[in-house]
Image: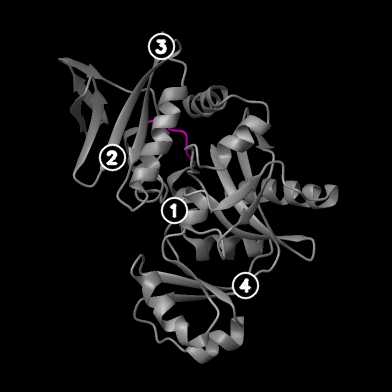
Amino acid sequence: MKKNIAIVMGGYSKEASISINSGNVVANCLNTAKYNVYKVHILKNKWVLLYKNREFPIDKNDFSVMLEEHKLVFDCVFNAIHGNPGENGSLLAYFDLIGMKHTSAPFYCMALTFNKHDTISVLRECGIKAAKSIYLNKGDTIDIDFIVKELNLPCFVKANNAGSSFGVSKIYNKEDLAKAIDFSFAEDDAVLIESFLDGKEVSVGVYKFNDEIKVLPMTEIVSENDFFDYEAKYLGKSQEITPARITEEEHKKLHKIAKKVYQSLNMKGISRADYIFVDDEPHFIEINTVPGLSTESILPQQIRAAGFTLSDFFEMAIEAGLR
């Protein structure tokens, strides 16, 4: 009997349109001979299932829907929501409460990894290298001279809880730092300021299947812009080279660290983390627990380089979720 699979997409953040692109890719790739595939938009003003050019409201009591006088219940949810509420743990906590199976990690792990500062704090305890950083909450006293002295310039200013490079600036001049901090605070109530790491940037997809952690082929990122910003990610302003042009020794180191990061953060499903090599040592930047799956995204390149079709790979994620 075919399983009913809901592909949730959209969300409450600026990444909603990116998420809908990802969700549509998943829905279009899944094997309809094996699954009944349904697109669900989770937006601030509505949760709806799209069916035959109509919208059917989701019953939030059990995440079911009345579809043409029949109650539709889902066997598993494929989470394609970047940002709030799909990537920050909120939606997954709800699914756990109602007993709904899904393709993501447990809600606490999702909440942790969406918080850049807390993720790095945990990984440092596990021996993972990262940039030196200063963390600010909205309302904190900001000492520009102290920040520059501690981190040097250039440095990065980031919204602590945001994706797709929203609220990120690279700062070269002390005079621009306060404005950059305000820019990040417009995206989030917390800001992370990091020292600049000068080196090769490499992105690594990791997934878990049959209780075994697997690492996908790695991608080297060469941005045409000053860093891997929104334009570089989604508007073609970068080269994404898979497999990455790194040495065998660098590959071994990053392969080992990528698995360790995934395991240390208690990840499940699909993730993609970014690293920068400094003196041949990988330094962790951040992890995406709902990585982009659109045609502009990195993970589909890695999936194909590993010899999978997107259909096969998404099916593995669903089967892992069902178990």
For label 4, the crowd category at 10 Å Cα-Cα, with few meaning under 14, some 14 to 19 and many 20 or more, is some
Q: CA distance from mark 4 to mark 3?
A: 50 Å
Give the residue type that dot 2 points to.
Ile
Give the residue type that dot 4 points to.
Phe
Q: Picture coordinates of residue 236 (x, y %)? A: 52, 48
Q: CA distance from mark 2 to mark 4?
A: 36 Å
Q: Furthest-left residue in view? A: 69
Q: Furthest-bottom residue in view? A: 145
Work out whether mark 1 precedes mark 4 in sequence or the reverse, and give the earlier one. 1
> Which span is picked out in magenta?
100-104
For label 2, the crowd category at 10 Å Cα-Cα, with few meaning under 14, some 14 to 19 and many 20 or more, is many
Q: Picture coordinates of residue 23 (x, y %)? A: 40, 34
Work out whether mark 2 precedes mark 3 in sequence or the reverse, and give the earlier one. 3
Task: Check disc 3 and report the residue beneath it.
Answer: 2
Provide the secondary structure element on which disc 4 rests.
Answer: loop
Task: Check disc 1 and report the residue beneath it.
Answer: 111
Q: Is residue 192 above or below residue 108?
A: below
